[in-house]
């Protein structure tokens, strides 16, 4: 058969008469079949598809990865959520004993959640499989919510607070709960229930408060994102002390509610308080903000505002806040502010040193209003169950405030609107304000128990630019700029209401040139 097939194959090379060609075509049908099986005439096979490139892992140990990189690595299959969670648990068990940042270890629950995350078909959650921590002053279903007070260990959360619920819905894995001072009311993280939390950079300086456990944990590599909250600086102060990034959102941006609470908070306390994230990079803070800000119907003050607003005309003008004459400023802080201003200028911003609207008056309004509400609503009950250290710290704050009568309180709340209006008009010309977090080097871990005078010095002189912003309800980001004498120094970026995007854009411009300072910390801890 093969021999027969060759003859007509050769003839086809010459032209043939039509009749002969027809006979040849009839006679050679089987040959044609053989011809198609001949190796020389078989069409080439299409090239095999190249194997998909193996997913690449981010650089460095797993616990050093950003939240953005971690979720991408899990989704790609480069690593499992269990592997990531195990790495963070190992890191927590390595460094937490000397820091005391995480005071409730949820490792077993975290591993169960990680295994479930790996089995889930839907891995679209923005934080799918990503380890985080929660501050122990919001409700975590089935757990006590003592808020640093031993007498409150019997308060069991019947449900998750909105911020916890939103993080879990996005796929986050909760490693543990972080430390906070009694009633979350000090700028230093210490309490008789769990003890003192240390700063991973230096045990001789405070980790800040009240979200000090959150700041110390995320800086040391325990979780990619830490939850915290802020009524007088409790996100921004720990971010500064621990060399990490945060955003105190506009009031109403992130929903808040504790079902375990015996009573609702008074109005101004609610309007001045915000939930928010701490992380090691601006990108992670943005991601966490998007997740945390999802709607929860239990918060009547929640606002469905977009996360991105209209961009200002370029170049964006930044006001470098003039520091009031009565504030004693350390040269290291002045240098850090100038360095941050230079980073912004090189990124296309236009920075001018100008006087901002009455920062001192705003701070006094904050101090008077919050202290009056506490005295009227909570003071007696708080003092009955708190430590001597708490009494000292609270006494120092109370001494600086004017306890208002009803007419005085109503006047102060009216003045709040005047202050907000002045700042909003200021943002029309300068969409971003660059200001200090503190004007002094970070103090010792218990400096607010030294004397009432020291408390007033810390809050009124050193962190005036932090606490004042709470009464305005404005968003404020903190980003690290430099390390001086082994201590990180951050700056604050303030923007108009619901313009967290502008504050974080400016923070990202600084971070791009300053770098992620916690890498220096990790090298020292190695």
Image: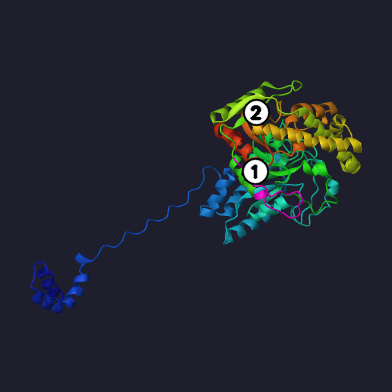
Disc 2 crowd rating (10 Å Cα; few below 14, some 14-19, many 20+) is many
Judged by its main secondary structure, the magenta piece is loop
Q: Is residue 144 above or below residue 332?
A: below
Q: Disc 2 marks which residue?
A: 319
Q: Nearer the viewer, mark 1 or mark 2?
A: 2
Q: Is residue 43 above or below residue 390?
A: below
Seen at 58% across and 54% down, the residue is 81
Q: Secondary structure at mark 2?
A: strand
Q: Nearer the viewer, residue 185 or 435?
A: 435
Seen at 81% across and 41% down, the residue is 268
Q: Which residues are magenta?
A: 291-310
| Residue 27 is at least partly visible in this image | yes
Residue 513, located in which quarter of the rendered image? top right
Q: In the rendered structure, which disc, 1 or 2, sits on the residue that comes first in sequence?
A: 1
Q: Nearer the viewer, residue 189 or 457?
A: 457
> What's the mark number on residue 427?
none
| Residue 463 is at least partly visible in this image | no
Residue 270 rendering spot, x and y as whole percentages: 79, 44
Disc 1 crowd rating (10 Å Cα; few below 14, some 14-19, many 20+) is few
Q: Where does the N terminus fall, quadrant-wise?
A: bottom left
Q: Is residue 6 left or right of residue 352?
A: left
């Amino acid at each position: 058969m093969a021999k027969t097939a060759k003859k007509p194959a050769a003839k086809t090379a010459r032209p043939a008469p039509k009749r002969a060609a027809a006979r040849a075509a009839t006679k050679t049908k089987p040959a044609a079949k053989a011809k198609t099986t001949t190796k020389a005439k078989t069409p080439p096979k299409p090239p095999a598809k190249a194997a998909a490139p193996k997913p690449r892992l981010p650089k460095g140990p797993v616990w050093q990865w950003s939240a953005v990189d971690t979720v991408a690595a899990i989704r790609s299959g480069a690593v499992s959520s269990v592997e990531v969670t195990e790495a963070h648990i190992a890191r927590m068990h390595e460094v937490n004993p000397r820091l005391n940042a995480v005071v409730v270890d949820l490792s077993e629950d975290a591993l169960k959640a990680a295994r479930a995350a790996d089995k889930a078909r839907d891995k679209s959650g923005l934080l799918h499989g990503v380890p985080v921590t929660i501050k122990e002053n919001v409700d975590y279903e089935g757990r006590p919510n003592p808020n640093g007070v031993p007498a409150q260990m019997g308060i069991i959360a019947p449900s998750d607070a909105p911020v916890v619920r939103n993080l879990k819905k996005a796929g986050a894995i909760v490693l543990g709960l972080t430390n906070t001072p009694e009633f979350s009311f000090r700028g230093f993280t210490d309490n008789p229930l769990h003890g003192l939390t240390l700063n991973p950079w230096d045990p001789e300086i405070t980790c800040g408060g009240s979200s000090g456990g959150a700041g110390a944990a995320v800086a040391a590599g325990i979780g990619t994102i830490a939850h915290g909250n802020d009524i007088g600086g409790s996100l921004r102060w720990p971010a500064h002390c621990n060399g990490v990034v945060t955003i105190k959102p506009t009031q109403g941006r992130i929903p808040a509610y504790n079902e375990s609470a015996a009573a609702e908070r008074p109005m101004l306390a609610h309007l001045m308080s915000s939930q928010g994230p701490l992380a090691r990079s601006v990108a992670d803070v943005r991601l966490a903000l998007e997740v945390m800000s999802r709607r929860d119907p239990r918060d009547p003050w929640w606002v469905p505002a977009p996360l991105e607003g209209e961009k200002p005309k370029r170049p964006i003008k930044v006001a470098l806040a003039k520091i009031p004459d009565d504030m004693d400023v350390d040269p290291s802080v002045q240098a850090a502010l100038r360095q941050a201003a230079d980073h912004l200028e090189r990124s296309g911003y236009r920075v001018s040193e100008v006087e901002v609207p009455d920062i001192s008056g705003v701070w006094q309004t904050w101090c008077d209003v919050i202290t009056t509400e506490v005295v009227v609503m909570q003071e007696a009950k708080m003092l009955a169950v708190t430590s001597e250290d708490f009494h000292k710290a609270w006494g120092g704050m109370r001494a600086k405030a004017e306890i208002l009568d009803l007419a005085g309180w109503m006047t102060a709340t009216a003045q709040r609107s005047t202050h907000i209006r002045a700042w909003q008009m200021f943002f029309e010309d300068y969409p971003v304000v660059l200001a200090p977090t503190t004007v002094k080097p970070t103090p010792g871990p218990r400096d607010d128990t030294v004397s009432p005078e020291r408390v007033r010095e810390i809050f009124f002189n050193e962190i005036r630019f932090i606490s004042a912003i709470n009464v305005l309800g404005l968003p404020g980001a903190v980003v690290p700029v430099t390390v001086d004498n082994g201590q990180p120094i951050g700056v604050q970026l303030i923007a108009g209401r619901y313009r967290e995007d502008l504050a974080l854009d400016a923070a990202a411009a600084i971070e791009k040139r300053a770098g992620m300072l916690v890498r220096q910390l990790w090298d020292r801890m190695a």
